[in-house]
């Protein structure tokens, strides 16, 4: 038992352990996702997060210690985002043919994402800081946290809300689009990318390359539109 405890102390302090934990958790969640017939309710990101949080809670590991290993995966987010340009390039002829619809949907989607979240908290009588934290929830995390900080919100809370929005959109977005009869892969991709940023885009790429390309485009344009427009509108309202 003493040797086992010493081994655990060594492993828990090693960045390699937490990197391995992250990769194994995602592989396990992906296996469940595949065995479940790719049911969107079995989202791999949600499953991986649940497994990692459970291990960290059971072992009493703080986030900073965990991130020493997970930072290697975090670094790959940049190249992975840039790689979204590949399916977009393959679908560029569709983008050029739909530029007007894309622009209109981006403006409408960005405003709707912000207004719907803020309106609910406004009616509930929430503080301005909380509303500022949730306003950019549909934007990719680094941009959303920067926007929230500028508006006087809590960037850490915004990061959590962004992840929840992404997972929720990836799980229920396709089901909702089926329910309302949206069949065009371009429209489906734009909707998911606008509402669910990178997590939703990953789900869209699993289903259809056209949807994934338009979802990646929507994710980038929504981040740009929100970063430019939201601080202006916020200043005018508050």
Image (cartoon, helix red, strand yellow):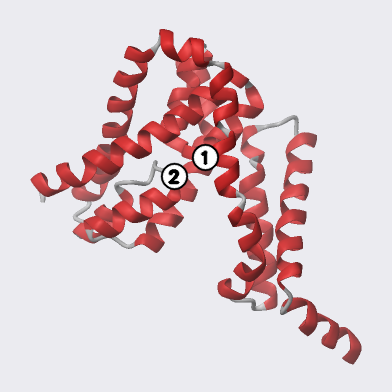
**How far separated are the C-alphas under marks 1 and 2?**
7 Å
Quarter of the rendering containing residue 83: top right
Vertical placement of 156 versus 37: above or below? below
Residue carrying label 1: 198
SS at badge 1: helix
**How far from the left and from the top, in percent, is residue 233?**
15, 42
Q: Position of residue 232 (x, y in %)?
A: 16, 43
- Residue marked by disc 2: 140
Q: Earlier in the sequence, mark 1 or mark 2?
A: 2
Element assignment for label 2: loop
Q: Nearer the viewer, residue 52 or 119?
A: 52
Q: Is residue 181 left or right of residue 22?
A: left
Residue at 64 percent of width and 62 percent of height: 70
Confirm or deny contact between disc 1 and disc 2 (CB under 8 A).
Answer: yes
Instruction: Assess disc 1: are there few (<14), some (14-19) or many (≥20) residues with their C-alpha within 10 Å of its C-alpha.
Output: many
* Residue ranking furthest to the bottom: 2
Left or right, 200 with respect to 112, comes to right
């Amino acid at each position: 038992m003493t040797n086992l405890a010493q081994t655990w102390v060594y492993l828990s302090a090693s960045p390699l352990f937490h990197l391995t934990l992250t990769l194994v958790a995602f592989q396990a969640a992906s296996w469940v996702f595949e065995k479940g017939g790719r049911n969107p309710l079995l989202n791999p990101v949600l499953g991986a997060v649940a497994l990692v949080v459970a291990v960290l809670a059971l072992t009493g590991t703080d986030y900073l210690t965990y991130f020493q290993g997970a930072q290697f995966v975090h670094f790959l987010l940049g190249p992975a985002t840039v790689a979204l340009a590949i399916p977009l390039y393959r679908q560029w002829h569709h983008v050029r043919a739909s530029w007007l619809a894309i622009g209109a949907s981006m403006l409408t989607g960005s405003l709707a994402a912000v207004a719907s979240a803020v309106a609910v908290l406004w009616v509930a009588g929430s503080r301005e800081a909380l509303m500022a934290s949730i306003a950019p929830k549909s934007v990719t995390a680094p941009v959303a946290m920067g926007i929230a900080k500028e508006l006087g919100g809590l960037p850490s809370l915004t990061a959590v809300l962004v992840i929840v929005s992404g997972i929720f959109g990836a799980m229920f977005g396709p089901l909702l689009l089926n329910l309302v009869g949206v069949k065009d892969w371009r429209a489906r991709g734009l909707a998911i990318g606008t509402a669910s940023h990178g997590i939703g885009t990953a789900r869209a790429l699993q289903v259809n390359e056209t949807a994934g390309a338009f979802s990646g485009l929507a994710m980038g344009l929504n981040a740009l539109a929100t970063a430019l427009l939201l601080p202006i509108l916020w200043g005018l309202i508050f």
